[in-house]
């Protein structure tokens, strides 16, 4: 089966320091992959590189998305092609209301797909319906993006955007961090509703807890900028029990989707 | 007034420990200032002609200048003709050849101040240049430092032994006409310290100058010049004290730092000049010009100061960030109690690309003390990617003091990012009461709160100094609450 | 001496007999004292700390002259506030009744031109105008030359629901329009005054406006200064407020026009429990220069002040901000917070900012912050990661940055008009259509 996204020997650095040291990963359509790993292993670097943040320099390797060179695209082009990053720390943008952002994003996407822009009424109807699904109060539409939101509200806002933008490939970067169990369930429900045979996801997390709710097809362990072990969902439980220490002494495992 | 207020007042009312006078035979030039005095000082030091001419030019500059007016500092006009511009302990020979020849009274003085001048003493990791009134009386560890090619000596010795270095660097950071007091200093400076760290050398010990004003009616006008050549590193400390006297005395120093490519200079000051008594009588007028230039790429200059003394402090240790990727830092604690006034801060002038500066200023006002932060962050056109972060915090103790913040931010490059934050808080009776209720005395509570407030600055000081600074702050605050 | 200064003094002396109120000895005395004070102080230069960053050289170079009568303006429909307003129109420094529409005002309220007030109800002005010296040289210049202005006197408890819209139009090249306004707001009374400035000529002219405001106990007053002068204009504006116990001031200053503009805004908490909010926005391009100099004097206990100024600087423009917060001894319980943020959009734009605190009391809570920089990279990336293109993302962020100030404006019609004006000034602003 051909991959939706294929990461080959990827190396990347931040402020001159190499973080990713040859990462390989293939994700097929509809698959959910989880990446786990200790702090500093490169999890967030991977998500930022895939989304195209400028101060992350790719120093080698390639990333193919639907067979095309992803790294050549600007961040907004990647988003329009169907890549979505749910941020670990969504930035607060004072003065810019949520509804402006959502409208600008939805219209940009529709234009890219050759669809007409939604009129104001249709757009509001659509947004309100989606907000309901992630249990967000419609008043959030007119509040500034993420400003003064609680941790849980910020994460729900991320999932709302994802629901509206219907990406082909979503990266959830430590989406569970800072969430209590109720908020975690709402967020996981939102994500699970979006699961379908075409949509792939990369779930980055430190803890196995999230994977009880968003059950992955594959689990990879990232350590020292490489994937050092891959397995099924049971690997997450093993990690929960044994920690990451034992993996660092293991020989480097074949990376990517197990054949 | 409440009970806790009175307690804090008592706490703030401690004695100035360094206020004694040393009896030693002195020689001084006649009072007053004119060209002859300038020539006499130069002749006394057997200076080369270039330096005499430089002094005279400064003097002529000074005569044309008007005394600076500062909104936040108030004092009666200074009579510049009523000051001795040169006073020095009489020694048998012109200069002591070794520590053994230094007048034992002077050695005792420094011992008493906690700055022993014998090399086996407590401050073993620190080389000291001791300046007493107008002259340097001793410099320790000279030979050990010389082995690394480091020059650490009195300014007079530097003029005699390394005139080419003095000529090359003197006045290149603070010119003779820079400001009123810098011009005055340039004309009449009598001694000071000189440091040269050669290429690639990391100075193996802390260098330190200890300034002592002893004689009556004298001004102290020292000049310090520190040059860190390419890749060199040095940490330099200065301390200062003076006897308790009813008259005000003038201290107008100039410090110039030059950091060449990749060099680091760390300059720390614990200023404890006599602050005057609790009614505002006496004390030192501390009018100082300190400036460093990051001349080379990736150089770094860091100023740390703890200002607890002086009746009036007027100083702005600054950094000119000329080299690309150079770094300037200013960490300051300034405390004013009783009738003390401080107007201090810094200037960070960003010229080079990707230059960075950090300013952290902590002002503590107690009694009737007035404390002003005055700072300039200037980013010029060429300073692409320049960054500055400034934080100014004021702590008020008692209702008769003042805390003022005057930042100036001038940005001419769009890629620069400059951030300034300031806040003011006080030690409240509720905080004190809380501590007391938990069994902590008001004194300890104030001391705890003040030390917490200053912690970020203290951690920039070399270890020995940090401890001294903390103690000093406790002493200076005595009796401030009420 | 200074020839320009002499010229303005001579103009003032020559006009004295014709200026409004010249029949009243105390008004003549007021103007004469102002001329004397101006002569003593001289026009400010860079050597004055308060004028470190702004030059009045244009006033010295060009001889601006007051016009004896207003230029022709046929109608002001284009500038009416859609939600309705009590409108006063001044053209070239003269009140034009035909263009004004005061509508229905509540009882015990006086709203009229300054000249009419001096002619009809001088006793209402005497105590305030005649008291003390003019605070600075430009106030003195204003007093010496004021041809007209606005007078508002609201009795205790009077609430004026609709905004009072004062429209200042300049029609002539080389003209000097000087207006003095006096606004007295009674105990518990409430009003909003919008002073809007427009230029109908592309040439240079000079506007000098000054409003003196007195807020009685518990009064509530919102003042807007919308400076949209012509691109070669010199604009000097001032608002000086004195607040009695429990009164509330909201000041909004928006600068988009003029070549050189200076706004002096000062409020004095004369009694306890006052509140003030000072907001400002300057959006500049070309060679525009705008200076905002604000002073909040906490002279009494338990005052609260909040200040927020944002600047967007493009082209060769220069934005200057000074925010002085003074806390007098015994002004315990003071709570003051201030922020000034600036975005530089071009290589040649400049910002000078001075947030200042002068505190003489210990039981206070004061803070200030200032930033200068570019559009935040993290915000930009966030928007782009949602598929929003770079130019649109930038405009959304600029719009949001300005809106943080504009959204504090209480008059909806003004807020919407300003948002529209703002959008028109953004580069490639068409991309915002359909989104905002």
Image (spheres, coloured by chain):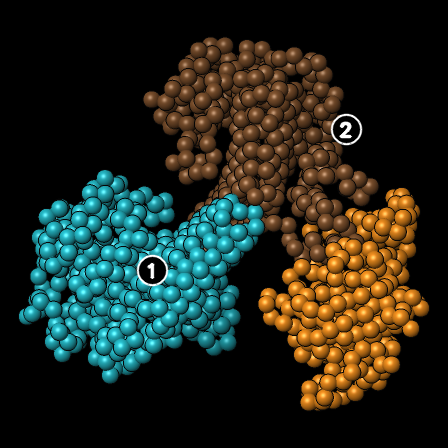
Chain colours: A orange, B cyan, C brown
Q: What's the residue at 62%, 13% (across, down)?
A: C71
Q: What's the residue at 57%, 25% (across, down)?
A: C232
Distance between the alpha carbons at the discs numbered 2 and 1: 64 Å
- Is B396 above or below relative to A237? above
Q: Nearer the viewer, residue B78 or C201?
A: C201
Mark 2 chain: C
Q: Where is residue A176? Give x, y as percent.
A: 77, 71
Q: Quadrant of the N terminus of chain B?
A: bottom left
Q: Where is residue B268? Give x, y as percent.
A: 36, 66
Q: Nearer the viewer, residue A142 or C319?
A: C319
Mark 2 secondary-structure assignment = loop
**Residue C313 shown left or right of residue B323 in the figure:** right
Residue C315 visible to an observer of this rendering:
yes
Residue C82, labelled with which disc?
A: 2
Q: Where is residue C103? Give x, y as percent.
A: 73, 21
Mark 1 chain: B
Residue A136 visible to an observer of this rendering:
no
**Residue A70 shown left or right of residue B406 in the figure:** right
Q: Nearer the viewer, residue B214 or B60?
A: B60
Q: Where is residue B88? Give x, y as percent.
A: 13, 63
Q: What's the residue at 23%, 43% (across, down)?
A: B61
Q: Which residue is mark 1?
A: B257
Alpha-carbon neighbours of circle 2 within 10 Å: few (<14), some, or many (≥20)? few
């Amino acid at each position: 089966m051909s991959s939706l996204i294929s990461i080959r020997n990827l190396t990347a650095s931040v402020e001159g320091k190499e973080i990713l040291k040859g990462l390989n990963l293939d994700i097929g359509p509809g698959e959910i992959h989880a990446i786990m790993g200790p702090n500093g292993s490169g999890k967030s670097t991977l998500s930022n590189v895939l989304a195209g943040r400028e101060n992350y320099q790719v120093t080698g390797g390639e990333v193919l998305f639907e067979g095309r060179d992803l790294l050549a695209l600007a961040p907004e082009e990647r988003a329009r092609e169907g890549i979505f990053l749910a941020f670990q720390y969504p930035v607060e943008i004072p003065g810019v209301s949520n509804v402006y952002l959502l409208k600008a994003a939805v219209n940009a996407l529709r234009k890219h797909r050759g669809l007409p822009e939604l009129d104001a009424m249709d757009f509001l109807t659509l947004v309100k319906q989606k907000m309901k699904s992630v249990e967000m109060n419609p008043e959030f539409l007119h509040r500034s993006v993420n400003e003064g939101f609680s941790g849980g509200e910020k994460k729900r806002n991320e999932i709302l955007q994802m629901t509206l933008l219907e990406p082909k490939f979503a990266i959830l970067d430590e989406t569970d961090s800072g969430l209590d169990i109720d908020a975690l369930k709402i967020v996981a429900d939102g994500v699970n509703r979006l699961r379908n045979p075409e949509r792939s996801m990369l779930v980055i997390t430190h803890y196995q807890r999230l994977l009880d709710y968003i059950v992955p097809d594959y689990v990879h362990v990232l350590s020292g900028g490489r994937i050092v072990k891959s397995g099924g969902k049971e690997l997450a439980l093993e990690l929960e029990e044994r920690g990451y220490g034992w993996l660092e002494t293991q020989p480097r495992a074949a990376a990517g989707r197990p054949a | 007034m409440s009970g806790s207020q009175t307690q804090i007042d008592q706490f703030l009312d401690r004695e100035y420990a360094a206020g004694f006078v040393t009896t030693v035979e002195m020689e001084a030039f006649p009072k007053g200032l004119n060209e002859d005095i300038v020539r006499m000082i130069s002749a006394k030091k057997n200076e080369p002609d270039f330096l005499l001419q430089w002094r005279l030019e400064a003097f002529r500059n000074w005569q044309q200048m008007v005394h600076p007016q500062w909104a936040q500092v108030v004092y009666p006009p200074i009579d510049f003709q009523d000051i001795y511009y040169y006073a020095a302990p009489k020694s048998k020979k012109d200069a002591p050849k070794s520590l053994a020849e230094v007048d034992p009274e002077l050695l005792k003085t420094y011992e008493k101040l906690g700055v022993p001048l014998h090399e086996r003493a407590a401050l073993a990791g620190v080389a000291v240049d001791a300046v007493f009134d107008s002259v340097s009386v001793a410099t320790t560890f000279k030979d050990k430092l010389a082995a690394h090619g480091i020059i650490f000596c009195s300014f007079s010795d530097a003029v005699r032994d390394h005139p080419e270095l003095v000529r090359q660097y003197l006045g290149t950071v603070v010119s003779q006409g820079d400001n009123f007091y810098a011009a005055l200093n340039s004309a009449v400076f009598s001694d000071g310290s000189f440091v040269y760290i050669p290429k690639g050398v990391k100075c193996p010990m802390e260098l330190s100058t200890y300034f002592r004003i002893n004689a009556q009616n004298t001004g102290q006008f020292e000049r310090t010049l520190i040059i860190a050549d390419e890749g060199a590193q040095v940490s330099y400390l200065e301390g200062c004290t003076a006897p308790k006297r009813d008259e005000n005395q003038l201290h107008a120093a100039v410090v110039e730092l030059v950091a060449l490519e990749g060099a680091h200079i760390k300059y720390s000051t614990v200023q404890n000049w006599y602050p005057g008594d609790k009614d505002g009588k006496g004390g030192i007028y501390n009018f100082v010009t300190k400036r460093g230039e990051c001349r080379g790429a990736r150089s770094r200059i860091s100023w740390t100061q703890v200002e607890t003394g002086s009746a009036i402090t007027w100083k702005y240790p600054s950094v000119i960030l000329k080299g690309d990727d150079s770094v300037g830092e200013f960490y300051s604690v300034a405390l004013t109690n009783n009738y003390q006034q401080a107007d201090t801060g810094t200037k960070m002038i960003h010229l080079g690309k990707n230059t960075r500066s950090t300013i952290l200023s902590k002002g503590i006002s107690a009694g009737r003390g007035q404390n002003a932060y005055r700072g300039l962050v200037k980013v010029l056109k060429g300073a692409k990617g320049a960054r500055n972060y400034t934080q100014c915090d004021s702590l008020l103790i008692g209702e008769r003091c003042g805390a003022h913040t005057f930042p100036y931010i001038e940005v001419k490059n769009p890629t620069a990012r400059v951030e300034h934050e300031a806040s003011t808080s006080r030690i409240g009776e509720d905080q004190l009461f809380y501590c007391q209720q938990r069994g902590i005395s008001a004194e300890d509570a104030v001391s705890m709160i003040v030390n917490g407030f200053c912690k970020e600055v203290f951690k920039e000081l070399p270890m020995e100094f940090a401890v001294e600074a903390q103690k000093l702050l406790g002493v200076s605050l005595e009796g401030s609450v009420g | 001496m200074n020839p320009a200064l002499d010229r303005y003094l001579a103009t003032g002396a020559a006009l004295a007999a014709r200026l409004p109120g010249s029949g009243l000895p105390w008004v003549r005395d007021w103007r004469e004292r102002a001329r004397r004070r101006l002569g003593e102080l001289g026009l400010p230069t860079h050597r004055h700390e308060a004028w470190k960053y702004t030059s009045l050289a244009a006033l010295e170079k060009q001889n601006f002259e007051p016009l004896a009568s207003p230029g022709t303006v046929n109608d002001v429909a284009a500038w009416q506030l859609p939600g309705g307003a009590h409108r006063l129109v001044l053209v070239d420094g003269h009140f034009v009744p035909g263009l004004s529409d005061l509508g229905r005002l509540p009882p015990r309220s006086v709203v009229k031109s300054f000249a009419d007030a001096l002619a009809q109800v001088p006793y209402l002005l005497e105590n305030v105008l005649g008291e003390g010296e003019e605070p600075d040289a430009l106030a003195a210049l204003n007093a010496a030359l004021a041809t007209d202005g606005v007078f508002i006197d609201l009795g205790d408890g009077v609430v004026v629901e609709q905004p009072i819209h004062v429209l200042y139009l300049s029609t002539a090249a080389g003209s000097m329009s000087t207006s003095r306004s006096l606004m007295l707001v009674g105990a518990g009374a409430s009003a909003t005054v919008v002073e809007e400035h427009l230029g109908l000529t592309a040439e240079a002219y000079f506007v000098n406006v000054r409003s003196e405001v007195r807020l009685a106990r518990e009064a509530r007053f919102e003042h807007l200064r919308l400076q949209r002068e012509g691109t070669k204009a010199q604009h000097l504006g001032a608002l000086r407020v004195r607040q009695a116990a429990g009164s509330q001031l909201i000041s909004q200053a928006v600068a988009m026009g003029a070549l050189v503009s200076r706004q002096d805004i000062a409020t004095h908490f004369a009694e306890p429990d006052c509140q003030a909010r000072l907001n400002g926005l300057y959006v500049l391009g070309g060679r525009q220069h705008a200076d905002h100099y604000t002073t909040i004097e906490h002279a009494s206990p338990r005052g609260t002040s909040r200040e927020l100024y944002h600047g967007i600087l493009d082209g060769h423009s220069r934005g200057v901000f000074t925010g002085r917060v003074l806390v007098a001894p015994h002004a315990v319980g003071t709570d003051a917070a201030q922020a000034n943020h600036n975005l530089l959009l071009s290589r040649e734009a400049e910002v000078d900012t001075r947030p200042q605190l002068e505190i003489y009391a210990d039981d206070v809570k004061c803070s200030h912050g200032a930033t200068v920089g570019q559009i935040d990279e993290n915000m930009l990336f966030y928007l782009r990661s949602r598929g929003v293109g770079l130019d649109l993302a930038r405009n959304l962020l600029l719009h949001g940055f300005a809106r943080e100030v504009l959204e504090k404006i209480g008059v909806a019609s003004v807020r919407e008009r300003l948002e529209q004006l703002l959008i028109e000034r953004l580069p490639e602003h068409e991309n915002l259509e359909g989104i905002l």
